[in-house]
Image (spheres, helix red, strand yellow):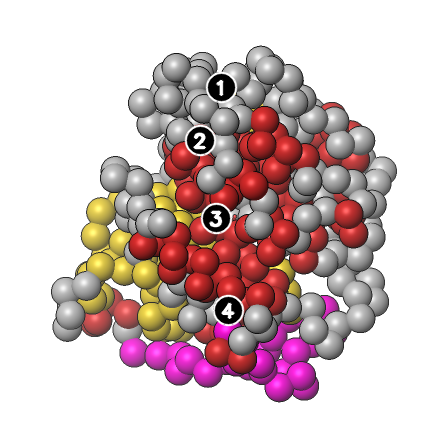
Amino acid sequence: MLKEEKTLQTFVKDICLISPRCRIDMPDCTMMNKNGMVSKIQTRIRMDPFKSNYDVVGKPLGRGKFAVVKKCIEKVTGKEHAAKFLRTRRKGENCRMDIINEIAVLESAKANPFVISLHEVYETTNEIILVLECAAGGEIFNQCVGDNDDAFTEKDVIRLARQILTGVAWLHHNNVVHLDLKPQNVLLTSSRPLGDIRIVDFGLSRRMDNVKEVREILGTPEYVAPEILNYEPLSTATDMWSIGVLTYIMLTGESPFLGDKKQETYLNVSQVNVDYSQEVFEGVSSLAIDFIKSLLIKNPRQRATAEDCLKHAWLNGHTHPYNGHGHTRLLPSMHEPETSQSESDPEPERPTPSPELVIVASYSLCPGQGEIKAGRGGAFPFEEPLIQQELVF
Ligand SMILES: Nc1ncnc2c1ncn2[C@@H]1O[C@H](COP(=O)(O)OP(=O)(O)OP(=O)(O)O)[C@@H](O)[C@H]1O
């Protein structure tokens, strides 16, 4: 057995034994509001100028809707980090508490080897800066849409999926749900040689303990589970759906539910309209397909949990041989997204389009940042997260 697998197995065993060592530092319940957001952090927020302590280098590592992430070097140590600059005001509202919640989740997951680690926090008049471990290999998204030489082999996907599941099992065991797992939020410590995964972006995360029910409209259309569209309670199973989608994309390079219109995407999700054909899964083992099928199930209660998944035969050395290419898929060429934005600014806020679907009461969208092939032919832009609109308890 490989050393890394051994470590993973020990780690998973710890989780399964509900080891007290694995439990995250539980914040006082009074520090948690009723929608599962944590409002108390332990990290000291620094008010001295970030730039006195760090040099920002190169072009941005990535952008989100309200954040830009830049590589920086800590002056004292010479160590590389990723600084996430988050605007505190969004659409005219003070969103500081959302950022505090993100910090709290990162803090509490510091013992989780597959969650990005938080080094320091700074605050200025308009933004909060999270100084994070730098995941130099970038998003797994890039390798999902990369050409054949960059594409993951099934063996790669097995190793990465085990890491994602181990990280997520840990979160779930500690009552944390991520709610925005997608190929842009799973990073690599290095791309060549292929490194280890780091889960990022806990901006939508919630704690499920001491919360009766969380029903929110959030997530990214292609990855959201049917219960989100149906406005039903969210749970750890909601993340498991996204892992099913993520695995499908890593193995095939295709997004299983993506349609050419948002309505079509939503319909595909709510009808669990998935293409498991030979054509899409050329050279992929039947166990891999069986694994995905255990996750893309409409009823959240019937979906495999992260711990179930880690015991699945596909992740435990029972794969069938790969195709002759040693790659999981043959990808069409895909172009990089164009950007005319200045490097230092986060994406500008876009006007909220009018609602397009009855089942999702209202949501806002911003343009895609990349492209991936839709499950049913054609390349369509990735869609950005739905913005939470309403909470019901
Ligand atoms: N620690 C890191 N190391 C390297 N790159 C990173 C790191 N954190 C984030 N990135 C890059 O920046 C991008 C945006 O980061 P992140 O998803 O955390 O921002 P966000 O504003 O919360 O995003 P969203 O709008 O999707 O919620 C990521 O997709 C990734 O490409």
Kindly state the secondary structure of the residue where label 2 is placed. Answer: helix
The label on residue 162 is 3
Residue 4 appears left or right of 317: left
- Does the stretch in magenta take in 24? yes
Lower sequence index among marks 2 and 3: 2
- The residue lying at 56 percent from left, 21 percent from top is 281
Give the CA separation, mark 1 to mark 2: 9 Å
- Does the stretch in magenta take in 32? yes
Give the CA separation, mark 2 to mark 3: 12 Å
Kindly state the secondary structure of the residue where label 3 is placed. Answer: helix
Q: Amino acid at mark 4?
A: Asp
Q: Amino acid at mark 3?
A: Arg
Residue range corresponding to the magenta coloring = 22-48
The label on residue 14 is 4
The residue pinned by badge 2 equals 154
Q: Nearer the viewer, mark 3 or mark 4?
A: 4
The residue pinned by badge 1 equals 283
Q: Amino acid at mark 2?
A: Glu
Lower sequence index among marks 1 and 4: 4
The answer to whether residue 147 is above or below residue 305 is above
Q: Point out residue 170 in the picture as x, y percentages from the top left corner.
A: 54, 64
Q: Point out residue 111 in the picture as x, y percentages from the top left corner.
A: 42, 71
Disc 2: CA contacts within 10 A as few (<14), some (14-19) or many (>=20)? many
Disc 4: CA contacts within 10 A as few (<14), some (14-19) or many (>=20)? some
